[in-house]
Amino acid sequence: MIPIQIGDATLYCGDALGVLPQLTDVDAILTDPPYSSGGQHMSDRQADTRTKYVTSRSGNKLLADFMGDNRDQRAFYFWSTLWVGAALRAAKPGSVLCVFSDWRQLPISTDYLQAGGWVWRGIVPWVKTQARPQLGRFTAQCEYVVWGSSGHLPLDRGVGVLPGFYEYASPQQREHITQKPLGLMADLLAVAPPNSLVLDPFMGSGTTGVAAVQKGHRFIGIEWSPVIFDIACRRLEREQQNLFDAPKAAEQPGLFGEGA
Ligand SMILES: C[S@@+](CC[C@H](N)C(=O)[O-])C[C@H]1O[C@@H](n2cnc3c(N)ncnc32)[C@H](O)[C@@H]1O
């Protein structure tokens, strides 16, 4: 498959399971795969992603449905094990994998990460500052980043000390139903040593890519939906233009670049 090159970003439109075996030398993987969640029962999971994840208040009704979010629990576990295994083979020894999960899929996420051959190293909560309160229940206000390494993880990787949780509101202006905050992705990429090759096999609108490029990393992104792939290309192109224009705007900071 021929990728599209935008500056230091290499973008593939296709199935991650088909593209991952072509990749090597990855230093860090930060990704937000389809959760196949969104409800208690199988019928809830098999609804389209707009029905599951767009609330009447969120104003994102026009955003495109995304793919691969309708597996039952056994299929989700099996498929996740396949892609994390392929990701391990694409990654360098000592590289890091960070995968998003919601609370329902958290137990299976720590299982599949290890079944795929990664060393599980912890869970980092993302505290979403707003969440819908429910009478008589704890508020489900977090998503989680399950992380691990390809084998031994040296202490002196040049990344310093990292926090135990992150607090960010979900983006108000979105181009993807489950778009992650740019600042959150940039903060999480602190786990990658300088000049890393960062991979997101489920890049959606390309938030990981924009954050990676802003931090001076190289990036490989994969997205199967052509409509969403185009959105990622446009965001990466805009970011590339921003990087090009930044020196000219040095005397007027704040004019360029996507905000967090
Ligand atoms: C949860 S979204 C990622 C959103 C992203 N973090 C953002 O900020 O825009 C997961 C994406 O993975 C894509 N996807 C699902 N299955 C895939 C597969 N097998 N290969 C590549 N992409 C896939 C979906 O179309 C969806 O856009």
Image: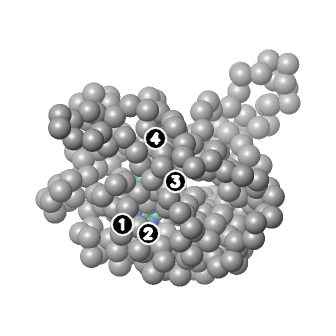
Q: Residue at x 75, y 70 (%)?
A: 154
Residues at marks 1 and 4, CA–CA distance in whole angstroms: 18 Å
Residues at marks 2 and 4, CA–CA distance in whole angstroms: 19 Å
Residue underneath mark 2:
110
The relative height of residue 215 versus residue 252 in the rendered view (above or below) is: below
Q: Quadrant of residue 235?
A: top right
Residue underneath mark 4:
127
Horizontal relation, residue 253 to residue 137: left or right: right
Farthest top residue in view = 252
Badge 4 local density, few (<14 within 10 Å), some, or many (20+)?
A: some
Kindly identify the amino acid type of the residue bearing the numbered disc 1: Pro
Indicate the position of residue 244 as horizontal and vertical percent values. Answer: 79, 37
Q: Secondary structure at mark 4?
A: strand
Using the image as rendered, state which of residue 169 and residue 68 is in the foreground: 169
Indicate the position of residue 33 as horizontal and vertical percent values. Answer: 43, 60
Mark 1 or mark 3, earlier in chain: 1
Kindly identify the amino acid type of the residue bearing the numbered disc 4: Val
Using the image as rendered, state which of residue 3 and residue 77 is in the foreground: 77
Horizontal relation, residue 157 to residue 45: left or right: right
Residues at marks 4 and 3, CA–CA distance in whole angstroms: 10 Å
Badge 3 local density, few (<14 within 10 Å), some, or many (20+)?
A: many
Using the image as rendered, state which of residue 182 and residue 118 is in the foreground: 118
Using the image as rendered, state which of residue 151 and residue 175 is in the foreground: 151
Residues at marks 1 and 2, CA–CA distance in whole angstroms: 6 Å
Kindly identify the amino acid type of the residue bearing the numbered disc 2: Thr
